[in-house]
Image: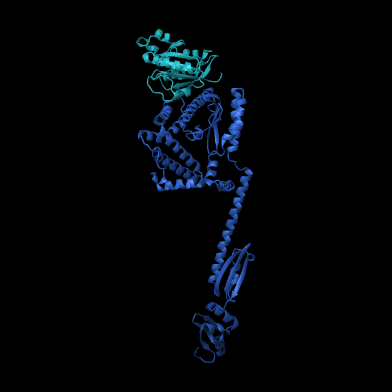
Amino acid sequence: MSAPPPSIADVPMSDDAKLALLRAVAAGHLREEVVALNARLSQFEKLFATNQNVVDFVATALPQAMQQAHMPRTRPHLDAAMGDPWIGAASYAAEHKLEGATQALSPIILPAIGQAVKERLAALSKAMERASPARRVQWKIKSLQTGLPLETVMEQDLDPFRVHSLLAVEMPAGNLLASYRVPEEGDAANSDSKSAEHAEDDAYATAALLTALRSFVRDAGIGAGQGELSSIDVGKRTLHIGQQGSLMVAVEASGSLALDLEPSMHSELFPALRSAKSLDDRRAVLARWRTGATDKTKPKSPSALKLILLICLALLAGLWWAKRAVEQTDIARTLSRLRSAPGVASASYQRVDGGWQLFVAADPLAQVEPIVQDGLIPRQKIGLLVDPVLSLDPTSTARALEQTLPPPVGVRLVVTRTEVRVLGTAAKEYFEALRQHPRVRLSNLTVTGQTSTIAATVTN
Amino acid sequence: MSAAKKICVLGMFGAGKTSLVDRVAFDRFSADYKTTIGVRPVPATLGEGTPSAQRVVLWDIAGESEISRLTRTYLTGAHAFAIVMDGMRGESVEAARRIVRDCDAEYPHVPFVLLLNKADISGAWDVNFDTAQSHFSQNLFRVSAKDGSGVREAFTEVLRAP
């Protein structure tokens, strides 16, 4: 069959959904799913191309068989499994007699994955928003330590791997050798013998159905690897299947699987099951192995001490950050006051080890020090470098004139941008001295006022 | 109670296999006819409440007039076979003869029992019980999924076989 590989561009999805899907794939945590999907698509393609009977069987037999099983306690997740996209896709392909099964499957499966990805990302985003700062920090640290994407770390933490039940089955007969069901919430309330019997019935039926499915998959050649079914998704749970000789073990689990169970099954579980003599022994073996497998796969939660340490670190970091922010605001305020102060030409700052360094270009008569001392930051944490400049602003000029040429008693000086006004009566020599003052000359200011000997306005 | 035993229920389509399995497992009967596709494993207990109680898993296999390749995989490891015929249809006896022949050839050591269903309306049968019995050397039971007569006895009998 020469159908082109499915392209995401051809799939009827919104651009946002496509983008989310691509991001998720790029982030890595969906890569395995996509690889598995491609493998499944190619299996279907091969299968559909070679055997129309199998198409009909897949399309109709499995869902109907499940529906018609009408077992007394059909599990909700068995019903959910019937809604699996691949069942729908197979039905669609069979109904429309499509030659390119891949083309038929991709528009159905990829949007389903896209939707799942969108929902998962939204859920993770919500979880991140609701998580405590300490937990967020914990996820980020673990992501850095393990090199796993943050989303994966969050999923493992939020959705830890859990084993719900184990079945040991004699193959190919499908006879249940032993089963172990992990007690769950609510079991205590339903711990009567009827419930136990129902659970046992489920185990017998599951073992037989699994055997039938496995036989079918092997005969049809659609299994992964060497034509064997290695796992089945059943609603939110997955049956992980391992086989060694005539012994098959099915592990019903949920959550993110952080460890490949297969090696542990082969090295520990199968030999132990073979050496077990009775039904009870085998059940005990299953229970022990389940505990070990769960311990190996569950993400380690931080100890209380570690958590406290993390919280303290977060608090310290918060305090340090807050203090730094306060100092930054204060130094900016000091700088602003300096820049607007009379006689200051420019001001800037630099952060230095343990404090601040101010660089000020100011008139020697400018009031710089009082402004620096007036801030919240301790004075010893501020270095001050003043570059002296001659300021010609009226305030500095007035200050300089009053210091170097103190006005006579009863006389007051008013300096503006254009003149020095002498209020009161002064000697002519005083006027002359004012006119010769460097700041007056450099500013080209006019000196006006009354002299003591000449009752007339003197202007230069 | 010992480990559950596997009993495969075979026979022509529409012979009443699913109804008989439901009678054994749930003690119920439904007149609604549903075709079984593939296989339907149903756990049950024979001789419930007695010291000889035995857990079984009844493999209700889709109706066929002879054993197909797919069905053969379901039969592997069976402890017993129950082959069902419909007293209203003579061709179901012919189908049962072919199934017995196949089972004898491939699973010579697995015991089986023959069940002639719809005993509640035996007056209207196409099949003569004595003639049917002459075809088979094994136990033949007259049973009714509708009223339950003879059903449990037949399934219990097959497990007694050595």
Image color mode? by chain
Which chain is assigned cyan?
B
- Name the spot of residue A400 as percent of width and height, x first: 58, 80
- Name the spot of residue A271 as percent of width and height, x first: 61, 28
* Residue occupying the point 64% across, 65% down: A380
Q: Is residue B28 visible?
A: no
Image position of A60 with respect to A131: above or below: above
Horizontal side of residue A55 vs A164, given as left or right: left
- Name the spot of residue B4 as percent of width and height, x first: 53, 20
User: Chain A shown in which color?
Assistant: blue
| Residue in front for this viewpoint, A123 or A272 | A272
Q: Is residue A379 visible?
A: yes
Instruction: Say which quarter of the image contains residue B117.
Output: top left
| Residue in front for this viewpoint, A46 or A163 | A46
* Residue occupying the point 45% across, 21% down: B60
| Residue in front for this viewpoint, A287 or B57 | B57
Quarter of the image with the N terminus of chain A in it:
top left
Image position of A223 with respect to A29: above or below: above
- Name the spot of residue A48 as percent of width and height, x first: 41, 34
